[in-house]
DNA sequence: AACTTTATTCAATTTACATCA
DNA sequence: GCTGATGTAAATTGAATAAAG
């Protein structure tokens, strides 16, 4: 397919009255050897173009283009090019704004995440203290089991509780987790990790918030939230 | 339906000019 | 005042797409 033959602006005679430098710019300079005579549009021309750009939703039909070109003393092709470049500038500005807004919501989300993480740590610590209290004062009741002696023993006791919850007077929360483990198993993991002093169980639950300069956001046990690859600023 | 022509758009790039250190 | 670096707007290029004949 043959490309249409456009008028070459560089070969046009553009009178200095049609396009002129803005007042604050100092007057200069002899043109270069290739006869290119490129001048910035005047403030008045830019004002008109801008106003049409916003009022016509950034597009211009050909009749309006010819009319505008006549009004501003420009070639229709120059009008087309100006709109084209203006759309590109607008798009790039739009992307900047989108980026700023996305970053703000990310920062907000990250801050909430840290708060929840601290809350979680605090609750785990309370849970451990409660476990220790129960161990010191054994009595009758649904939690009369001795936790904390060793991991194997705890695991065995918890499995019995999970297998026959009703008989043991224990109600497990079922959060419809999509993970293979149910809520009872999560409780097992938490207690197991705490009781044998193994901090790795917590690492199974929470992965590192920041790694390799990028950010991975992954909370596995209770939801399927995965925000990965949000490393668009370095 | 398949083709050519014409017109338009966009992304990427080049060019000319203004400004500043 | 000259010069090189830099930023920006105007213009070009090449590809894609759509409408009309």
Image (spheres, coloured by chain):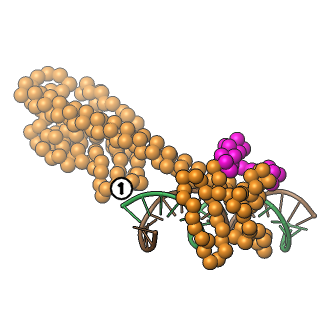
Chain colours: A orange, B green, C brown
Q: Is residue A229 left or right of residue A159?
A: right
- Residue at image x 71%, y 49%? A59
Is residue A61 in sight in this rendering? no
Rendered position, A223 above or below A134:
below
Q: Is residue A21 left or right of residue A217?
A: right
Q: Nearer the viewer, residue A165 or A28?
A: A28
Q: Position of residue A186 (x, y in %)?
A: 28, 40
Q: Residue furthest top?
A: A140
Q: Is residue B8 left or right of residue C21?
A: left
- Which region shows up in magenta? A44-67
Per the picture, the main secondary structure of the magenta-coloured stretch is: helix
Q: Nearer the viewer, residue A102 or A132?
A: A102
Q: Residue furthest bottom?
A: A33
| Disc 1 target residue | A234
Q: Position of residue A40 (x, y in %)?
A: 62, 58
Q: Chain of mark 1?
A: A
Q: Position of residue A131 (x, y in %)?
A: 14, 31
């Amino acid at each position: 397919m043959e490309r249409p033959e456009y008028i070459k602006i560089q070969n046009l005679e553009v009178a200095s009255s049609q396009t002129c430098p803005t007042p604050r710019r100092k007057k200069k300079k002899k043109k270069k050897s290739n006869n290119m005579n490129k001048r910035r549009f005047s403030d008045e021309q830019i004002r008109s173009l801008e106003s049409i750009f916003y009022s016509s939703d950034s597009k211009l039909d050909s009749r309006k283009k010819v009319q505008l070109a006549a009004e501003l003393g420009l070639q229709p092709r120059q009008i087309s090019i100006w709109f084209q470049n203006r759309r590109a500038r607008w798009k790039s500005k739009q992307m900047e704004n989108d980026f700023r807004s996305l970053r703000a919501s990310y920062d907000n989300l990250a801050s909430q995440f840290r708060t929840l993480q601290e809350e979680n740590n605090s609750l785990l610590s309370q849970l451990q203290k409660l476990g220790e209290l129960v161990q010191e004062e054994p009595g009758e009741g649904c939690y009369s089991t001795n936790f904390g002696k060793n991991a194997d023993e705890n695991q065995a006791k918890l499995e019995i509780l999970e297998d026959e919850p009703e008989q043991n007077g224990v109600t497990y929360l079922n959060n419809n987790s999509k993970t293979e483990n149910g809520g009872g198993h999560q409780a097992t993991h938490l207690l197991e990790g705490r009781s044998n002093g193994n901090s790795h169980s917590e690492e199974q639950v929470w992965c590192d918030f920041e790694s390799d300069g990028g950010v991975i956001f992954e909370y596995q046990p209770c939801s399927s939230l995965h925000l990965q690859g949000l490393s668009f600023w370095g």
